[in-house]
């Protein structure tokens, strides 16, 4: 069925859209969660609510639903020290700011077009760019499309299907605005999506132009998963989030999580219905824990619900090459302290899909059920980065003081020399 064109906005209704714009998991019913937590933990609602307030309003910066989703209220599961290791998205961003001190490189790494071209030029696999929608001028050799008509004409005439479309800017962890297109039917003037549904070309072009033209929209060749991934989880391209850090001695992997797609999911975000999330041993590529659902609906599974393939204990294909790929990529920007890579275990080999200089570390907590701000994971990296910055700042202040003292000495000497000259 073709998608409906954009409806005019009004005070009562929002325009109907084809792509996801308001995204993310639905918020939980906090009062109901509070009562359920009381039943599960044996604690009073006052005690749980007070603790939740500390996690929401305090340094951890959790959302109320995260407090319940990770069952932080459960004193039988977590000690006070272990609870303190959980962080929310805002705290995650603060930590990344402390680690990533070379600010001028961050936008470059996050830019899907510019950094993608750098990866490709360096021999690192990255999806082939087909066209770019942008209101700002770009070289025509980049496949520049400006305006609704140019977008529609491209979609009707290109022979590059299947295509994957996504915004150039925006929150990569949420995958707003993505589209997977398998072909075009001239008889009906419609596009076919990955799940078999169809879109009116004019409506789709209008929406991409209106919502994403100012920031840019990228069309790439669609990437298909490794045959072993297909057997395990179907044809959806679930990426592995591998976080790497560089503390001055070269990049190293910190942790990994595999975002496993359901059959009809357009993207691999864990909040999308039917998707799963696995904790991956970053050294071996073996799945140590697999989860589905969210909040109190979190459920640990051993097999894929659609393929029945064994997931728990399974080792992802091409893992050694996957790690080498992200380390090679991070080596291109060694001054950047931490990067989250979305990497596809593809049929042509490990392929970087995106780089994120502000990876949301709550994904680690969703995958493992543990706090990420522990000494072996993120706390140590953060504290060492803060200490290095403090040392650099102290050295810089010392250099400024030394320079000022030298300048003063030189000025005094110039005055003495001048006086001696007058007296002679």
Image: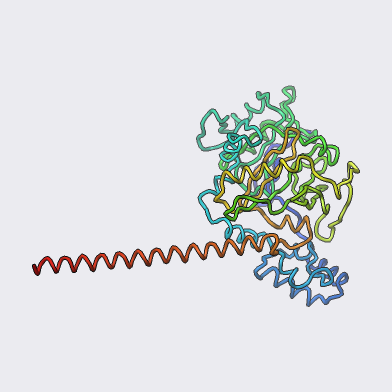
Total labels drawn: 0
The answer to whether residue 78 is above or below residue 195 is below
Residue 422 % position (x, y): 10, 67
Residue 392 % position (x, y): 49, 62
**Quadrant in which the C terminus is drawn:** bottom left
Residue 150 % position (x, y): 59, 29
Question: Which residue reaches farthest left?
Answer: 424
Q: Name the residue nearer the viewer: 170 or 41.
A: 41
Q: Is residue 13 visible?
A: no
327 relative to 404 in the view: left or right: right
116 relative to 417 in the view: left or right: right
Residue 8 % position (x, y): 65, 43
Q: Is residue 289 visible?
A: yes
The picture quadrant where one finds residue 220 is: top right
Residue at 56%, 33% in the rendered image: 146
Look at the image and name its color scheme.
Answer: rainbow
Residue at 82%, 70% in the rendered image: 74
**Quadrant in which the N terminus is drawn:** top right
The picture quadrant where one finds residue 346 is: top right
Residue at 22%, 67% in the rendered image: 413
Question: Which residue reaches farthest front?
Answer: 424
Q: Name the residue nearer the viewer: 385 or 66.
A: 385
């Amino acid at each position: 069925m073709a998608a409906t064109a954009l409806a005019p906005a009004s005070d009562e209704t929002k325009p109907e859209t084809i792509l996801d714009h308001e995204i993310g998991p639905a918020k939980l019913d906090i009062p109901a969660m509070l009562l359920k937590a009381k039943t599960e933990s044996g604690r009073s609602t006052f005690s749980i609510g007070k603790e939740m307030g500390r996690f929401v309003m305090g340094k951890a910066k959790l959302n109320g639903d995260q407090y319940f989703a990770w069952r932080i209220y459960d004193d039988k599961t977590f000690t006070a020290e272990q609870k303190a290791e959980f962080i929310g998205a805002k705290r995650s961003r603060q930590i990344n700011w402390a680690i990533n001190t070379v600010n001028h490189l961050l936008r470059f790494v996050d830019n899907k077009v510019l950094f993608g071209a750098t990866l490709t030029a360096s021999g690192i696999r990255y999806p082939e760019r087909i066209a770019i929608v942008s209101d700002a001028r770009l070289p025509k050799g980049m496949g520049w499309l400006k305006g609704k008509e140019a977008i529609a004409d491209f979609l009707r005439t290109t022979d590059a299907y299947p295509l994957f479309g996504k915004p150039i800017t925006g929150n990569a962890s949420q995958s707003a605005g993505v589209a997977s297109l398998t072909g075009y039917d001239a008889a009906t003037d419609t596009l076919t999506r990955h799940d078999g549904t169809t879109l009116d070309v004019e409506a789709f072009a209008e929406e991409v132009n209106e919502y994403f033209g100012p920031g840019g929209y990228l069309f790439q060749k669609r990437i298909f998963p490794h045959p072993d991934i297909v057997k395990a989880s179907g044809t959806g391209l679930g990426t592995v989030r591998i976080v790497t850090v560089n503390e001055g001695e070269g990049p190293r992997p910190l942790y990994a999580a595999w975002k496993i797609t359901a059959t009809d999911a357009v993207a691999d975000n864990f909040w999308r219905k039917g998707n799963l999330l696995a904790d991956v041993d970053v050294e071996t590529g073996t799945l140590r824990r697999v989860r589905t659902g969210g909040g109190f609906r979190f459920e640990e599974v051993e097999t894929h619900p659609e393929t029945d393939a064994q997931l728990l204990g399974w080792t992802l294909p091409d893992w050694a090459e996957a790690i080498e790929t992200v380390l090679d990529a991070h080596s291109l920007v060694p001054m950047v302290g931490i990067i989250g890579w979305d990497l596809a275990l593809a049929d042509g080999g490990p392929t970087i899909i995106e780089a994120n200089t502000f990876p949301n570390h709550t994904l680690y907590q969703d995958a493992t059920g543990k706090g990420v701000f522990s000494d072996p994971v993120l706390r140590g990296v953060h504290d060492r980065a803060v200490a290095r910055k403090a040392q650099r700042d102290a050295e810089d202040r010392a250099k400024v003081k030394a320079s000022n003292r030298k300048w003063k000495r030189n000025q005094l000497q110039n005055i003495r020399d001048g006086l001696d000259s007058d007296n002679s």
